[in-house]
Image (spheres, rainbow, N blue to C red):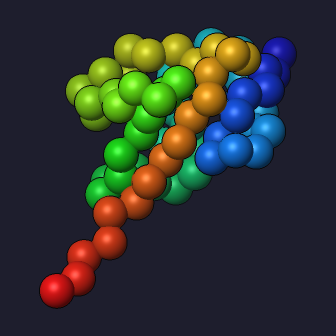
Amino acid sequence: MMITLQLNGSAYQVEDGATVADLVASLSLTGKAIAIAINREVLSDSQWSQRRLLSTDAIDIVRAIGGG
């Protein structure tokens, strides 16, 4: 079964029971320099495999960009 949540302001479907780590992998962002906020609260990467996604979640993913 799929659930629909908000990802960077747009509707996005994931499997019911999916974790943040599953979402990161599905977006091909594993190992990338990113930050994730769920419902405006930043989530440390150590919590990604434990935090299950809910249909009420609003997720923002930001990629770090180097520069000088």
Residue displayed at 77% across by 33% down: 13
Residue displayed at 35% across by 31% down: 42
Figure quadrant of the N terminus: top right
Q: Is 35 left, or right, of 37 in this rendering?
A: left
Position in image of residue 51 (x %, y %): 44, 16
Q: Is 12 left, or right, of 18 in this rendering?
A: right
Q: Is 61 left, or right, of 45 in this rendering?
A: right
Residue furthest front as drawn: 40
Residue 25 shows in the view: no
Figure quadrant of the C terminus: bottom left
Position in image of residue 61 (x %, y %): 49, 47
Question: In the image shown, does 30 or 43 lie closer to the viewer?
Answer: 43
Which quadrant of the view contains residue 29? bottom left
Residue 20 shows in the view: yes
Which quadrant of the view contains residue 48? top left
Placement of 52 over or under 4, stated as above or below: above
Residue displayed at 25% across by 76% down: 66
Question: In the image shown, does 26 or 11 lie closer to the viewer?
Answer: 11
Placement of 43 over or under 23, stated as above or below: above
Number of numbered markers? 0
Question: In the image shown, does 55 or 41 lie closer to the viewer?
Answer: 41
Residue furthest left as drawn: 68
Placement of 67 over or under 50, stated as above or below: below
Residue displayed at 53% across by 42% down: 60
Placement of 53 over or under 28, stated as above or below: above
Position in image of residue 16 (x %, y %): 71, 15
